[in-house]
């Protein structure tokens, strides 16, 4: 199917948003919150997924806020239909307490939704939650999205010779933010079950969704994926994801440290914290990878990896949802290879 790029508004243009929400109370709150910002206007409210699909065709919004638990057609199916026929940036709004919802949230992301935000903070009047929502809308509305097929095509898995020995002297650190769930999915699903070293991950995602992300990735890839735990010894062929609102470090002799600590580069967990730790613990055996995301988190950490003679990869601009984090590392001159997303796993295995 030929990719179709959605025309993007200029940065100073008003962002036209379609709200998809079956709760009248929540939809009123959303409309009021969004219309209060001079750069955003709500062009319509859809009460179910089928109506959302039709309203996207009619209104051509710059962005859709998508509830998952909807009547007639749920938000996952609506996302699939929109991204197949009228590609539009989609921000999923969901409650982490919604039973069975986490799987559909990440399935929606696998079909092209860009990110997820927890509903509770802004529906209960939390200022920080409202700011997060507004900021994400302003950043995601300008993202170029492509047409997705109705059925996801599984990528070919990278092959590694069976004789490749497992070793604790090498480690891979993967870091991502906006657009990160799908980017991480793409990299991890291509790695073989006998991958010869540990993989540690920092993903910036709304609090409450990290565990769901881990469950989703585990169901889709050959490696074992889990949340990192304090004092846990690293094992080859395992993926350890930093838990919500905690920094994760790798400390000698190859164990995990989980701490609260202050924000670093504006984040907790921080990519820079993780990357600096793998540089210190593994030296030239460390491989740092920065994927799509907003901001500069991870750039200083990539510099630390290079200083210890480790190797580094940044996702390229064409395949990044947001090129902020990769660009920051590239501008520091600490990136060995700038690669499209689909080439990262193969390069990683070749290096190992």
Image (spheres, helix red, strand yellow):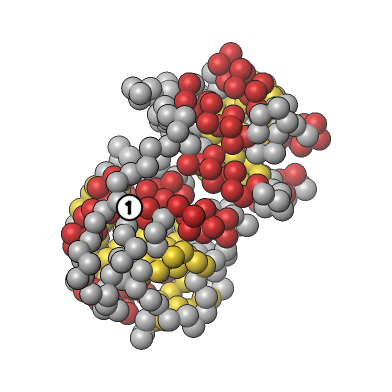
Residue at the extreme right of the image, as rendered: 25
Residue at screen point 51% across, 37% down: 113
Q: Is residue 24 above or below residue 183?
A: above
- Quadrant of the frame with the C terminus: bottom left
Instruction: Specify whether residue 214 is in view.
Output: yes
Q: Is residue 85 above or below residue 157?
A: above
- Quadrant of the frame with the N terminus: top left
Instruction: Specify whether residue 328 is in view.
Output: no
* Relative image position of residue 149 (x, y in whole percent): 42, 29
Residue at the extreme bottom of the image, as rendered: 253
Residue at screen point 37% across, 55% down: 188
Q: Is residue 293 above or below residue 89?
A: below
**Quarter-of-image position of residue 243:** bottom right
Q: Identify residue for label 1.
A: 190
**Quarter-of-image position of residue 305:** bottom left
Give the SS element for disc 1.
loop
Please indicate whether residue 252 sits to the left or right of residue 230 in the image. left
């Amino acid at each position: 199917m030929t990719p179709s790029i959605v025309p993007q508004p200029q940065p100073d243009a008003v962002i036209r948003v379609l709200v998809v929400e079956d709760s009248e109370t929540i939809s009123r709150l959303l409309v009021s919150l969004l219309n209060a910002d001079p750069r955003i206007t709500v062009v319509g409210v859809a009460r179910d997924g089928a109506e959302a699909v039709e309203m996207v065709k009619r209104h051509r919004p710059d962005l859709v806020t998508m509830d998952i638990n909807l009547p007639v057609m749920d938000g996952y199916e609506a996302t699939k239909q929109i991204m197949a026929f009228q590609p539009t940036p989609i921000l999923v709004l969901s409650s982490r307490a919604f039973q069975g919802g986490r799987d559909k949230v990440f399935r929606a992301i696998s079909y092209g939704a860009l990110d997820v935000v927890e509903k509770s903070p802004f529906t209960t009047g939390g200022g920080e939650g409202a700011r997060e929502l507004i900021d994400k809308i302003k950043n995601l509305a300008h993202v170029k999205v492509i047409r997705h097929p109705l059925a996801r095509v599984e990528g070919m898995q990278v092959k590694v010779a069976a004789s490749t020995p497992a070793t604790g002297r090498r480690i891979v650190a993967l870091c991502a933010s906006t657009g990160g769930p799908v980017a991480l999915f793409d990299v991890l699903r291509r790695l073989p079950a006998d991958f010869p070293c540990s993989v540690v991950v920092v993903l910036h995602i709304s609090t409450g969704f990290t565990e769901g992300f881990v469950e989703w990735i585990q169901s889709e890839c050959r490696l074992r994926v889990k949340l990192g735990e304090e004092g846990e010894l690293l094992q080859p062929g395992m993926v350890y994801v930093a838990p919500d609102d905690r920094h994760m470090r790798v400390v000698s002799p190859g164990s995990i440290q989980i701490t609260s600590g202050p924000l670093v580069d504006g984040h907790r967990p921080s990519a820079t914290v993780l990357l600096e730790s793998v540089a210190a613990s593994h030296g030239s055996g460390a491989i740092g990878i920065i994927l799509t995301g907003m901001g500069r988190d991870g750039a200083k950490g990539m510099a630390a990896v290079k200083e210890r003679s480790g190797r580094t990869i940044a996702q390229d601009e064409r395949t990044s949802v947001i090129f902020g984090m990769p660009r920051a590392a590239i501008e520091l001159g600490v990136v060995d290879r700038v690669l499209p997303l689909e080439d990262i796993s193969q390069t990683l295995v070749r290096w190992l």
